[in-house]
């Protein structure tokens, strides 16, 4: 073979090899598929790849974030509803209706006004006392009953979480753990969980039953518990570990509340003394010199000064209360 023929054949073979590599070689997708097959990984678009994609931690994080957003939106709506008279009567576990509460408040105001009017108290003071007796005192008593009930609930709530944790770790379902709390825990914890169990037994979903529990007890502890169970039901996870962490958080909050109470005791006593001192001094002066104090109640200028002093005292008490009311 002459050299020219050999060169032509070699050139043709080289051109064919270059053309195969540029045009007829494997594509990026084919190359990726072969590399994945060699490495033991699924190719793009396979069912295994799709399943792994749904189990990706980032996807689970997005599901948790979406669940939290929905829970926060529902909580904002419930917070607006929890300030009504009907909601506050339910939170205090009172069986009276809002209409009866309003009628009782109006009757208290009218009785107070009539009693003071009979004793010859000036009309301006009668109006102020009637407003306080009919509007302020019933709501103050209602708030006190709500706070006392919430405090009793929180005292035993961490123990209830421990019951669920131990039950789940031993293999009991969540419903049985809730029944144990309902029958073994003191009220109001037991009573509230009995309502949750009864609602679930008639077909109400657990998230709806927990929302109703939060409506009756709008405190952060119940909110934490409902959020943990809703997230666990939506995205899965270790329920025992989540509730164990929640129990530790609740106990830490309780310890922090006791520390705050001890550290703020001096400020509270000082506020009580400062708030009660003008009333005590006025009573002592009235006992020692009634004629001197009578001008505050019999003259127009004295009544005006008395009302201004009462308003300033009320504003000062509210300011001191805000200063010693710690949020934790």
Image: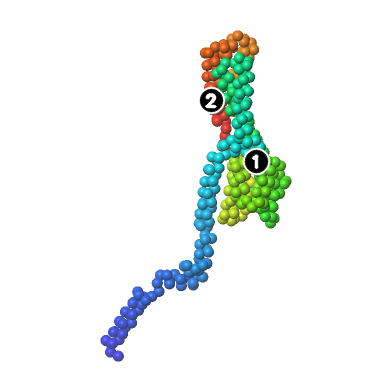
Q: Is residue 253 above or below residue 312?
A: below
Q: From the image, tell me which residue sits under label 1.
A: 154
For mark 2, does the 10 Å Cα neighbourhood hold few (<14), some (14 to 19), or many (20 or more) residues?
Answer: few
Give the left or right position of residue 173, taking residue 74 as reference.
Answer: right
Q: Which mark identifies residue 315?
A: 2
Label 2 or label 1, whichever comes before in sequence order: 1
| Mark 2 secondary-structure assignment | helix
- The spot of residue 37 in percent (x, y) is 49, 72
Does residue 196 appear anywhere in the picture? yes
Front one among 234 and 203: 203
- The spot of residue 244 in percent (x, y) is 64, 49
For mark 1, does the 10 Å Cα neighbourhood hold few (<14), some (14 to 19), or many (20 or more) residues?
Answer: many
Does residue 151 appear anywhere in the picture? no
Front one among 255 and 49: 49
Front one among 228 and 175: 175
Q: Verify CB contact (< 8 Å) between mark 2 and mark 1.
A: no
């Amino acid at each position: 073979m002459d050299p020219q023929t050999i060169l032509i054949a070699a050139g043709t073979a080289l051109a064919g090899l270059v053309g195969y590599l540029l045009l007829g070689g494997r594509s990026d997708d084919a190359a990726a598929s072969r590399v994945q097959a060699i490495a033991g990984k699924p190719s793009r678009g396979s069912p295994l790849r799709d399943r792994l994609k749904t189990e990706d931690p980032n996807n689970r994080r997005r599901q948790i974030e979406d669940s939290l957003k929905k829970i926060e939106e529902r909580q904002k709506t419930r917070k607006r509803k929890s300030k009504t008279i009907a909601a506050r009567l339910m939170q205090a576990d009172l069986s009276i209706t809002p209409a009866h509460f309003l009628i009782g408040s109006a009757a208290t105001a009218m009785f107070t006004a009539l009693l003071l009017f009979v004793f010859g108290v000036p009309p301006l003071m009668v109006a102020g006392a009637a407003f306080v007796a009919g509007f302020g005192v019933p709501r103050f008593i209602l708030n006190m009953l709500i706070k006392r009930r919430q405090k009793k609930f929180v005292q035993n709530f961490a123990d209830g979480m421990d019951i669920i944790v131990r039950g789940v770790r031993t293999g009991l379902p969540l419903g049985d753990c809730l029944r144990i709390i309902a029958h073994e825990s003191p009220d109001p914890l037991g009573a509230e969980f009995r309502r949750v169990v009864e609602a679930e037994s008639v077909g109400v979903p657990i998230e709806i039953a927990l929302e109703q529990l939060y409506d009756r007890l709008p405190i952060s502890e119940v909110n934490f518990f409902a959020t943990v169970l809703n997230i666990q039901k939506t995205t899965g996870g270790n329920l025992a570990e989540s509730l164990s962490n929640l129990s530790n958080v609740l106990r830490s909050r309780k310890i922090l509340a006791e520390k705050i109470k001890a550290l703020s005791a001096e400020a509270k006593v000082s506020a009580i003394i400062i708030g009660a001192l003008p009333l005590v001094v006025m009573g002592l002066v009235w006992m020692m010199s009634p004629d001197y104090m009578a001008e505050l109640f019999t003259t127009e200028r004295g009544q005006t000064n008395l009302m201004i002093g009462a308003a300033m005292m009320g504003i000062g008490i509210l300011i001191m209360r805000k200063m010693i009311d710690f949020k934790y």
